[in-house]
Image (cartoon, rainbow, N blue to C red):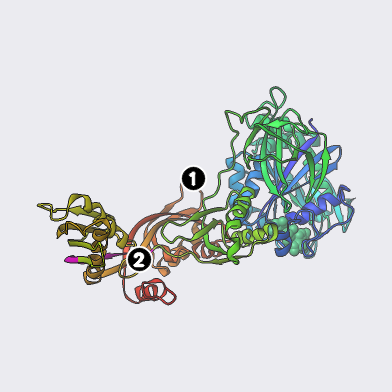
Amino acid sequence: MSDKRTVAIVGPSLSGKTTLLESLLFVTGAITRKGNVKDGSTVGDSAAEARERGMSTEVSAAAAEHNGVAFTFLDCPGSIEFAIEAQNALIGADAALVVCEPDPARVLMLAPIFRFLDDHDIPHLLFINKIDRAHVQMRDLIPAMRAISGRPLVLHQVPIRDGDTITGYVDLIGEQAYAYKGGAASEQVEVPDSVKDREHSARTELLESLADFDDALLETLLEDEVPSRQEVGEYLKTEVAANKVVPVFLGGAEQDHGVRRLLDHMAHLVPAAAATAAGRGLDAANGEPLAQVLKTYLTPHGGKLSLVRVWRGSLPDGVVLNGTRAAGVYRMMGAQQTKLGAAEVGDVVALGRLEGIGTGDTLVKGAKPPEEELPRAATPPPVYALAITAEKRDDEVKLSTAIAKVIEEDPSLSVEQNPDTQEFVLWGQGEIHLQVSVARLRNKYNLEIKTQSPKVAYKEAIRKGISQHGRFKRQTGGHGMFGDVHLDIKPLPRGTGSEFHQRVVGGNVPRQYIPSVETGVREYLRKGPLGFPVVDVSVTLTDGSYHTVDSNDQSFKLAARVAMTEAMPKCSPVLLEPIYQVNIMVPNEATAKVHGLISGRRGQILGFLAKEGWNGWDEVEAYMPQAELHELIVELRSLTLGVGWYTFAYAHLTELTGRLADQVLAKYGAHAEGE
Ligand SMILES: Nc1nc2c(ncn2[C@@H]2O[C@H](COP(=O)(O)OP(=O)(O)OP(=O)(O)O)[C@@H](O)[C@H]2O)c(=O)[nH]1
Ligand SMILES: [Mg+2]
């Protein structure tokens, strides 16, 4: 059981994770031909939506063997909009391999990943990819990365250069030099003289970093003794497993540079299943079988596969988990599956047909779900919305079922029927996330969807009051209708809502008809003279009259409507727009730009503070109109290399007048075109 390792491959968008997976699979012989991202022929990007875009859109699992270790790799999308995929995968991984580009200008993109790894104490290794394009010096790159990482980064390798190109590296632990050979294993060479000084200082630095967490090593160093290579390897292994230090490797996924050595080091450094379980407070050896769902896949033909980490025990095909029978145990290779007889401790494999069981769920053998759940990744709050409708009217019914299925695969997506605007609104993590979700609806469920920015929930109120008489009278053949009311209408302070009172004396409006007057008033208030729901108004029934034969509920309701329809346009109606409180989190070099963004969008800054526990980040608090929030996340990300985000909550309504109000009324108001 100790020879299984699950490694989640994570890192910023387009850093080369899927290409690296392809390379890892190729050099281990798990695949015989390398695909590439451009043609959509990789194992990692087998989903139609990923191929359409040349970017990963969901986690993919693939297995490979190296030096007697059975690896399962989880290739995670890098886009911040699909962060939930990586986070759920990381919960079940023994370690993360963080892949990044050799570009100091982009290291900020590592911030959210490092943060998640440290918050969850997940051991990780850093792979600086695209070394064939590295024109920067390590002395510029590494300090920039160190400023972002919460843990000390220790160089495992130093590059060997020939002019502008990196041709190989010296391994600081093995103290050996290697020259890259495109497409083949690197060749061991003499350590070039030009690198010797750098190697020496980097190795000293490595040992000192390790000694910071190990007294025995510290003593050895203080006594000027040199630990053996093997000892250094063991110190590193222990400290990586405890997430005390992060070793840094170099390479190029496209040419397989450094990939074999990376595998050797992963086989050594990535903790085994029992250690990972212990890190989660679990005993992998004793107790009933225990597993957890890392990802849910629904195939276009309706099959369901749950990617599961086995924390303890063995799960044979047909095992009943949480009351549901698993039909099929599969090893995954991108979109391909190989049937297995059972899943064992440390495995990450797919189980078939676990209906009713979702991503993150803890699984135990037997008829019931467990009493205690294992920790799961928090679902990120939504930041972007689109109103959707089916292209064909007949598909409206199909739509909600299909969306529920897409949400089952992707917990960071949600849907609501907006109570104010009546729109069906899809909520998610950004523009691309929603485009991909809409593509899934098309690719998997054959549904064509129309999208538009969601309507703003405008309201209206009045600025002055009035007393109004309203009468509804109809004399037809037999029974007539007669209702007659006097209403006092008054504005209320902002945020009060609407109120109905009555002060009728002497039974002028018989008691039983008063609720109908209120109904008439409230029905009217759903759409006021400007065309929006009316709020902050008080309506009092003061007087009226009735007819013994002709009066009834309906007549009084209609009389109230007559009075309201007559009165309200005379009460100086005013448009109200919803204002939200937003809290914007950004690296502090972007704070000034965010202030500009807020004021440019009619926002009001309430204050800003250094974000607690987040070195180098600010939190800016502001009021902003809902109408200005739709694209906020898009702009915020473009100011911050994608790492900024915000939370929002409805705050209050405020009057909107002038040109902006005219535009809203022309577009959505009572007399708008198409209304
Ligand atoms: N020059 C060079 N390009 C590379 C290397 N590895 C990957 N690329 C290119 O980088 C681009 C992105 O590669 P992907 O493998 O899709 O990156 P990714 O990290 O999986 O992207 P997402 O999953 O969308 O975050 C592609 O154009 C690759 O061909 C490399 O070692 N050298
Ligand atoms: Mg990818």
* Picture quadrant of residue 55: bottom right
Residue at 83%, 55% in the rendered image? 256
Q: Nearer the viewer, residue 140 or 219?
A: 140
Q: Position of residue 279 (x, y in %)?
A: 65, 32
Task: Judge whether residue 476 can be spotted in this image.
Answer: yes
Vertically, is 646 above or below 220?
A: below
* Picture quadrant of residue 476: bottom left
- Residue 367: in magenta span: no
Task: Judge whether residue 150 can be spotted in this image.
Answer: no
Q: Among all residues in the image, which is located at the extreme front? A: 477
For the C terminus, the quadrant is bottom left
Magenta: main secondary structure:
strand
**Mark in the foreground, 2 or 1:** 2
For the N terminus, the quadrant is top right
Q: Hey, what amino acid is under mark 1?
A: Gly
**Any mark on residue 613, and which?**
1
Which mark is first along the chain, 1 or 2?
2
Vertically, is 554 above or below 477?
A: above
Q: Residues within 10 Å of mark 1 (few under 14, many from 20)?
A: few
Q: Position of residue 248 (x, y in %)?
A: 71, 48
Q: Position of residue 330 (x, y in %)?
A: 79, 41
Residue at 48%, 56% in the rendered image? 417
Please give left or right for residue 221 compared with residue 42 in the image.
left
Residue at 39%, 58% in the rendered image? 580
Q: Nearer the viewer, residue 197 or 212?
A: 212
Please give left or right for residue 653 compared with residue 628 in the image.
left
Which SS class for mark 2? loop
- From which residue to which does the magenta span run? 458-470
Q: Nearer the viewer, residue 419 or 198?
A: 419
**Any mark on residue 532, and which?**
2
Query: Ligand 1 appears in which quadrant?
Result: bottom right
Q: Residues within 10 Å of mark 2 (few under 14, many from 20)?
A: many
